[in-house]
Amino acid sequence: MNLTTARTQELLVKPIPSVMTRLVKQLRRFAFTAAILVLWQYVSTSVLDQTTRALLPAPTAIFPAAWELITSGDLLHHTLDSLKREMLAFLWATIAIPIGIAMSWWRAIEEQLDPVMELLRPIPPLAWIPLSILWFGIGDTQNQFIIFLAIFFPILLNTISGVKSIEQNLIRAARCLGANQWNILRRVVFKAALPYIITGIRIGLGVGWMALVAAELVGASSGLGFLINDARTVLRTDYVIVGMATIGIVGLLIDRTIRWVSKLFLPWSR
Amino acid sequence: MSTVHVSHVCKVYPGHTGKDAPVLALDNVHFEVKNHEFCSLLGHSGCGKTSLLNILAGFEDATRGEILVDDKAVGDPTWQRTVVFQDYALFPWMTVQENIGFGLEMKKVPAGERKKIIQHHIELVGLKGFEDRYPHQLSGGMKQRVSIARALAVDPGVLLMDEPFAALDAQNRAQMQAEMGRLLANSDPQKRKTMVLVTHSIEEALILSDRIIVLTSRPGRVKANIEVNLPRPRNEESAEFIEMKAELRSLLQEETALAH
């Protein structure tokens, strides 16, 4: 280590905050969250009476319910069913990537596909639920169809804007280095659009997850959406809330996973 | 290693329908670059020199006239005419060595040989130790070194450079010009690549070129075709260098005066 690096090291040393200060700092972030939980607990146990309490069970009643659902395996099995649908629909929806690239690369394809896409895009995926139940019946296929629609368009639109924002000179450089059309599309266009495509996937999976739960509410016999709707019919609001919390947590985890994966696979984009 | 024959090239940009008139960018540009020669296209911005380079590379077509490389009219872009861009145009998802190897991969050079060629060019441009860096981890000067190495690695007949040092700061630019000048001075004149450089810098043109084509402003026409017979590496303090610099400056100044 030479003098300069030693000096750099020296300057980088900061006084280490005490364990107590760090703990307080961490806990301070959750002050408002805690206040809400306390208020919720208070309303549920002291404001509501015996009969109305069932509409808003206290946080202390949620944890036992969660434990029940976890130990019985019900929660896991419904979560996995939902995740499986989301993932399968996602795999189908990746067809949006080549379609998007083709649309932004070949004028004629864009000309033909654009009107169709523009007409279909504003229809919310949920509006397809009635028709899709008639087409596919109740179950996986119908659910996946709804999620597919929800994931497809964000990926498509982001792929298109990714390809359209490629620096012209990158393609020129590839051409003068001897790349043919296929190599330009695969090695340059796709790669350059990849950060956009991954953003599309992130948005798509988020929208898809919301659509999935909605689809399961009406058109499934398993999954988290089914779980909360089923619990409602027997007024198990504690199960409903556990189901809702799980939907939120899994949604968050999906988003975080994509972010982590994108950092792993896109070391060049800061 | 090729001769370039720019033959009566005209270029008209159509202009947007109804909005603005068509623009005549190049008017009857005619000159020749000999084998192994380093030729600069010198002119003010907007004189069409970059258009000419784009036609030469095959990115654009000439409206009239043609460019012959080794007596064959240029068509689509090929690795026989590689380009160094002002904004480097490095592939951000590839490391330094992957960028330099891209053209070799496209040429289907076997992996073992590819590695050797990459290593040779990394050493040539002084980037040893940076093989696995990504472009965003490099300074502007280093990026341009990668870009030059990438363009040279495929062993093109003609190397085209579009204001390669214009985006660098003054100090880096001077260093790159001097280094390139030394590289040219140390290379065997019979093995040098034919090079065409687009620039607006008189010094850059004089440090590097065997021939300087001065273009007029809007439309671009050949104003002067000057051979530079000074010994390499060029001595910027020498009387001849200073004299030529003054000559070129007055030529360009005439164009500035006309443009206003």
Image (cartoon, coloured by chain):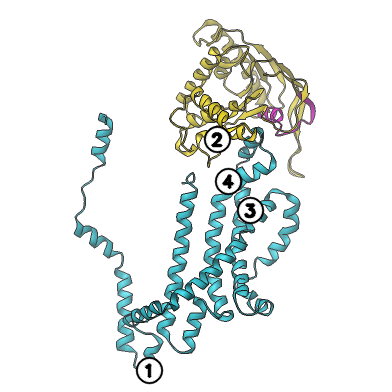
Q: Tell me the shade of chain B.
A: yellow
Chain letter belonging to callout 1: A
Looking at the rendered structure, the secondary structure element under dot 3 is helix
Q: Residues within 10 Å of mark 4 (few under 14, many from 20)?
A: many
Residue A45, given in percent of the width and then of the height, sits at: 30, 87
**Callout 2 amino acid:** Asn
Residue B99, numbered label: 2
The part of the chain drawn in magenta is B50-67
Q: Which callout, 3 or 2, points to the residue nearer the camera?
A: 2
* Labels 4 and 1 within one chain: yes
Residue B34, given in percent of the width and then of the height, sits at: 69, 14
Residue A160, numbered label: 3
At horizontal 63% and vertical 29% (from top left) the residue drawn is: B83
Specify which label sits upstream in the sequence, 1 or 3: 1
Pointer 4 with pointer 3, Cβ within 8 A? no
Q: Tell me the shade of chain A.
A: cyan
* Labels 3 and 2 within one chain: no
* Quarter of the rendering occupied by the C terminus of chain B: top right
Specify which label sits upstream in the sequence, 4 or 1: 1
Chain letter belonging to callout 4: A
CA gap between label 4 and label 1 equals 60 Å
**Side of A180 where A212 appears, left or right:** left
* Labels 2 and 4 within one chain: no
Q: Which residue is mark 1?
A: A51
Residue A186, numbered label: none
